[in-house]
Image: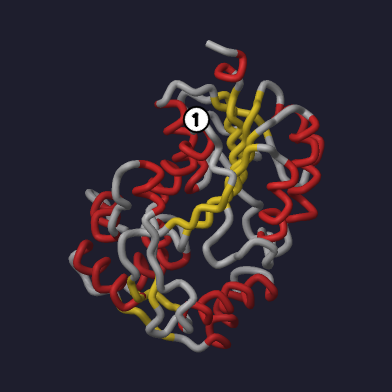
Amino acid sequence: MTAAATAATLVVGATGTTGSRTVARLVAAGRPVRAASRGATPLPGAEPVRFDWYDRATFAEALVGCDRVYLVPPVGEPDPAPVMLPFLRLARAAGLRRAVLLSSSAVPRGGPAVGAVHEALPGMFAEWAVLRPSWFMQNFTGAHPHAEGIRREGVVRTATGAGRVGFVDAEDIAAVAVHALTDEPAPNRELVLTGPEALGYDDIARIAGEALGRPVVHRRLTREELTAVLAEQMPDGFAALLAGLDHAIAEGAEDRTTDTVLRVTGRPANGFRAVVERETAGRQV
C-alpha cells in the first residue's frame, strides 16, 4: 500500500446529513477517516477530531495525516468565504492535494454564499470537485423545519408555488462524494446532483402522507410571508435568502433532473417515495 493510500480523508461536518454518510461509506471501503466536528464526536471506524470553522486554532491539528478533504460549509453562514478560504490555504500548504466541496444546485460558481469558495477551489488544488446537489429529500424526514411541520401539523409551508424540484437523497450525495474523493483521476469539475424526477411540494405532501398513512398538505405562502416565518427562527438576512430561493423555485430554477448519480456511481438515483419509506419505517416522522 502506498503512502497516498494510507493518508486519511478529513471529513468536515462529519456529524451532518451528508458528512455522516460520507464517513460511513469511506470507512466501509477501508479508507482511514478523520471525522471533524465541533465536539469531536466519535463515529464508528473513524478518528474523531475537533474542528470549528470559527476557531482557527482547530485548523492545523485537523489536517494532520490527511491528503484530501470533504468540505461542508458552516451552517447558516450567508458569506462563508472569509471563514473557509483561510482553512483551504492552510490545507494546501499542509500538502492536501484534493478537496471536494458541498455546494448547492441553487448556487452557481461565483454566486452568493458558497459560490465564492467554488470559484476559488480550482485555483487552489490540483484535484477537486464541487458537488451541487438539489434540495435534500431528508428535509422531510430529519430535523429540518419541513420535517418538523409534517410531524407536528401535517403541513409543509413554502413560497415555491407550483414550482418543481429534483429532490436528491443524501445517501446518493454521499455515494458521489466518496467517488469524488477517491476516484482516479479526480473529477476536476462541478457535479449537479438530483433525484430521478422533479416534484412539486404538492407532490411531496401527497407522497409523504401516503407513506405515513395520514394527511399532509402543502400550504403556499408568499415570499414575504415565508420571510416573516423564517425570521422567527434565524437572522433576517438568512431568512430573506432562503425565501428568495423558494421564489426562484416558483419561477422554475430547480425544475430539472440530471443523470450524475448514475454516471458516477453506476446505479440510478433513489426516488422520494422509497426514501420516505426507508427513513420512516417503524417510527413517526
Figure coloring: secondary structure
Viewer-side residue, 14 vs 42: 14
In the image, residue 171 lies at what x, y percent? 39, 46
Query: For residue 77, which quarter of the picture?
Result: bottom right
Figure check: 157 above or below 276: below
Query: For residue 216, which quarter of the picture?
Result: bottom left
In the image, residue 162 lies at what x, y percent? 38, 84
How many numbered discs, if any? 1
Q: Secondary structure at mark 1?
A: loop
Query: Tag 1: residue type?
Result: Leu
Q: Pointer 1: what residue?
A: 43
The structure residue drawn at horizontal position 67% and vertical position 21%, both measured from the top left corner, is 65
Is residue 39 visible to us here?
no
The structure residue drawn at horizontal position 63% and vertical position 74%, both measured from the top left corner, is 241
In the image, residue 255 lies at what x, y percent? 41, 73
Viewer-side residue, 174 vs 125: 125
The structure residue drawn at horizontal position 40% and vertical position 56%, both measured from the top left corner, is 138
Figure check: 92 above or below 156: above
Task: State the residue lying farthest toward the top.
Answer: 1
Task: State the residue lying farthest toward the front.
Answer: 185
Is residue 136 visible to us here?
yes
| Crowdedness near tag 1: few (<14), some (14–19) or many (≥20) residues, C-alpha within 10 Å | some
The C terminus is located in which quarter? Answer: bottom left
Viewer-side residue, 192 vs 222: 192
Figure check: 200 above or below 14: below
In the image, residue 66 lies at what x, y percent? 65, 25
Horizontal side of residue 198 vs 144, given as left or right: left
Figure check: 179 above or below 229: above
The structure residue drawn at horizontal position 23% and vertical position 74%, both measured from the top left corner, is 215
Horizontal side of residue 246 vs 79, given as left or right: left
